[in-house]
Image (tube, rainbow, N blue to C red):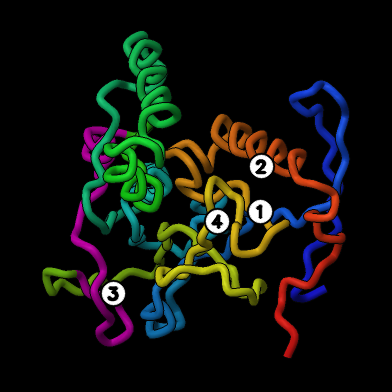
Amino acid sequence: MEGYALPAVFTWRAASRQQAKTRSRLCRRSVAAPPRVPALAAELDPRIVQLHSSEYRGPEQLREGGALVVGAGNSGAEIAFELARTRPTWLAGRDVGEIPVRHGSRRARLVLPLIRFAGHRVLTVRTPVGREVGPKLAYGATPLIRIKNTDLVGAGVERVPRVAGVENGFPVLDDGRVIDVPNVVWCTGFRQDFSWIDLPIFGEDGRPVHRRGVVEREPGLYFVGLPFQYAVSSDVLPGVGRDARYVARHIARQPVSARRPAATPLRRAA
């Protein structure tokens, strides 16, 4: 099946309240995206246990001794907080900030809806502030939500600069320090993999060129779930639903002749 989209049949209630059915190629961003791990990981001593955050289940997976958690976003902060209960723990990476309230508190019930509103309605491709700030938020680390910097300090987690290299099989920090640890957990996110689509639809940054998920260069090809597809919320449930409705309505408006047949190859002919 390499290079092909599975035949997907979508049924929805169109704006005219008449049911419509069609076949088109819809590329949904999967939650099973490949983990992003820096190339220097291959240079670490083979005795070091290395896990990506997607593989982490608990401290029992690690060897005895300290742990270096690389990536100081939400996953990194929460894993470091847990590991610090049983071992010396270092958290490497820049400070990504944190939401201004304690998650689950009374203040959070007032503030979080405002944050969600901004991410869903204000920070979109249609607003100047959205076009300026949206990509940075969508493709960067999200501010800490549940675990705060004070929680990390209280748990004994040591914050250190980012990992810059390897020396004698051990991680080297930006400040030149070598961290001699038997465990490294990579909380470095995931990469988008479009290698299975061999069509001229990508920009210089390697991302699909589209308008709210509609690929105008390839009629009949659509995306849903891309970061900042339309708004900062586009890769989470409220935004995905709105973007999917937009794509579905666009398909419903197309004449039958403009709809590509199912299982059309996503690779160009040799």
- Magenta residues span 148-173
Residue 118, how many percent across, how many down? 36, 26
| Lower position in the chain sequence, tag 4 or tag 3 | 4
Q: What amino acid is labelled 2 in the image?
A: Val
Residue 171: mark in rendering: 3
Q: Residue at x 49, y 52 (%)?
A: 59
Give the mark nearer the N terminus: 4 vs 2.
4
Percent of width and height locating residue 7: 86, 58
Q: Residues within 10 Å of mark 4 (few under 14, many from 20)?
A: some
Discs 4, 2 touching: Cβ within 8 Å: no
Q: Is residue 31 visible?
A: no
Secondary element at image label 1: strand
Which residue is tagged 1?
222
Asked if marks 1 and 3 touch (Cβ < 8 Å), the reply is no
Percent position of residue 224, x then y: 62, 47
- Residue at image location 86% in from the left, 46% down from the top: 22
Task: Name the amino acid type tagged 3.
Answer: Pro
Quadrant the C terminus occupies: bottom right
* Mark toward the viewer: 1 or 3: 1
Location of residue 261 by image quarter:
bottom right
Asked whether residue 228 is drawn in magenta, I would say: no
Residue 247, label in figure: 2
Contact check, label 2 and label 1, Cβ < 8 Å: yes
